Image: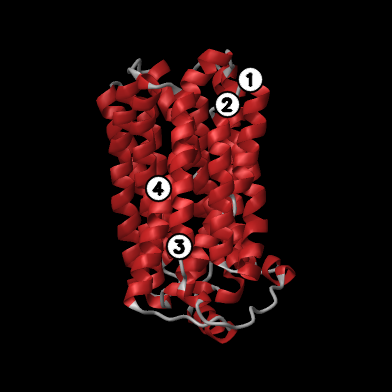
């Protein structure tokens, strides 16, 4: 077993560093959702091509979820986190040098390969540092960082594109990544890796046969269709349909994410307090809220009402992110990276599908976003159905304890 030292200092350092790195992660990743408006005009891209540029990242990102999770179980979280951050920072800079549609596809694909190992590795770092009863809240903090990163990316990207251009923006964001690579190299020391011990052999075949891992993947796939679909196309929707200026779009994008933050932290706190198996009720409730709110948003008669319903939708979908903490609660630490990798694989496949498919639907229906938003509504049915087949009880926790 990998030993863990649950001391306050190590928990604070690891959580703080991972929190800040997740913000950098989303700054590099989500800035493309704003930049694609200017890039599409410069390179004369169709909505389908714009969606493909965004999806090329997620295709590679999804592939690396499985590989990165396995590598984390085999080599430890610190090495994988450092390598991932360094590679994705390089290709963030390269994004600024893109000169065509084809170059964007290649660069963003390689960027996704570099970044894809980070989610699993960061979850394992938490498991190595926090006791089981605190992991959901710790994961909630990291998930909050993704929402904060989305806020910062939306606002900062819009301002920088207007002032210095999208090319320079990516150069600067990549430089920030290099700075954090040095900080992580010096200070990131997950407690579970501070004790010298042989890491157990990881059985990927055994992990792949676990039905619970695939159910969590399906839940996260449905949730992520909405998350990535909205983050990819809402900026364009505000500009092209609601006729809002780009910088104002960035400011509007902040408001719904605040509701996500509230929901993420509330659901994570509830998960640590609730008994085994009750998480599915949070996921079902959040999905239903999202379905109703997205339908109302797409039919809203004003920008104010559209933003209001989008805020409520973010609140609902934010509740469902409790699924991200479930592997930390129900799986042994020795195979956690691989398990988290399977779940994140589903999420990033959604990131591959949603932007391109929504772009195709927008093109097919002459610029109307109704069919694209309907796709997201249908996607939230997947977590609801899956939850009816999700059976978790105390035996899962007992089994996990024996495995650990």
Image side of residue 341 versus residue 185, left or right:
right
Which type of secondary structure does the marked residue at label 3 adopt? helix
How crowded is the residue under tag 1: few (<14 C-alpha within 10 Å), some, or many (20+)?
A: few
Which one is earlier in the sequence, the residue at label 3 or at label 2? 2
Q: Which mark is residue 186?
A: 3
Residue 97 is situated, as x and y percent measured from the top left of the image, at: 57, 26
Which one is earlier in the sequence, the residue at label 1 or at label 4? 4
Which one is earlier in the sequence, the residue at label 3 or at label 4? 4
Which one is earlier in the sequence, the residue at label 4 or at label 2? 4
Q: Against 59, is 76 above or below?
A: below
Q: Which mark is residue 97?
A: 2
How crowded is the residue under tag 4: few (<14 C-alpha within 10 Å), some, or many (20+)?
A: many
Q: Which mark is residue 100?
A: 1
How crowded is the residue under tag 3: few (<14 C-alpha within 10 Å), some, or many (20+)?
A: few
Q: CA distance from mark 4 to mark 2?
A: 23 Å
Residue of label 4: 23
**Which quadrant holds the N terminus?**
bottom right
Image side of residue 338 versus residue 308, left or right:
right
* Furthest-left residue in this view: 304
């Amino acid at each position: 077993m990998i030993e863990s030292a649950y001391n306050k200092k190590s928990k604070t350092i690891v959580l703080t560093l991972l929190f800040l790195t997740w913000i950098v992660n989303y700054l590099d990743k989500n800035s493309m959702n704003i930049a694609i408006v200017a890039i599409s005009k410069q390179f004369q891209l169709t909505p389908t091509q714009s969606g493909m540029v965004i999806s090329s990242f997620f295709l590679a990102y999804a592939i690396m979820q499985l590989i990165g999770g396995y590598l984390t179980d085999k080599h430890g979280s610190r090495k994988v986190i450092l390598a991932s951050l360094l590679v994705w920072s390089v290709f963030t800079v390269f994004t600024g040098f893109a000169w065509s549609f084809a170059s964007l596809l290649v660069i963003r694909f390689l960027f996704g390969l570099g970044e894809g190992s980070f989610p699993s590795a960061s979850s394992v770092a938490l498991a190595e540092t926090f006791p089981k009863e605190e992991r959901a809240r710790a994961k909630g903090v990291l998930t909050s960082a993704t929402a904060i990163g989305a806020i910062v990316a939306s606002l900062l990207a819009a301002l920088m594109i207007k002032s210095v251009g999208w090319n320079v923006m990516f150069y600067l964001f990549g430089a920030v990544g290099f700075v954090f690579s040095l900080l992580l190299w010096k200070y990131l020391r997950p407690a579970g890796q501070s004790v010298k011990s042989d890491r157990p052999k990881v059985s990927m075949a055994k992990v792949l046969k676990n039905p619970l891992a695939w159910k969590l993947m399906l839940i996260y796939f449905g949730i992520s269709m909405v998350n990535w679909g909205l983050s990819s196309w809402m900026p364009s929707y505000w500009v092209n349909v609601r006729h809002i200026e780009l910088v104002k779009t960035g400011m509007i994008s902040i408001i719904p994410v605040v509701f996500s933050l509230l929901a993420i932290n509330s659901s994570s706190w509830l998960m640590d307090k609730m008994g085994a198996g009750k998480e599915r009720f949070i996921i079902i409730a959040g999905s239903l809220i999202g379905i109703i709110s997205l339908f109302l948003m797409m039919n809203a008669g004003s920008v104010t009402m559209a933003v209001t319903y989008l805020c409520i939708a973010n609140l609902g979908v934010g509740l469902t992110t409790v699924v991200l903490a479930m592997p930390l609660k129900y799986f042994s630490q020795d195979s956690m990276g691989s398990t988290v990798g399977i779940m994140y694989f589903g999420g990033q496949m959604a990131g591959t599908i949603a932007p391109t498919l929504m772009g195709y639907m927008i093109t097919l229906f002459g610029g109307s976003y109704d069919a694209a938003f309907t796709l997201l509504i249908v996607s939230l049915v997947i977590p609801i159905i899956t939850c009816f087949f999700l059976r978790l009880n105390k035996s899962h926790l007992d089994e996990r304890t024996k495995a650990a």
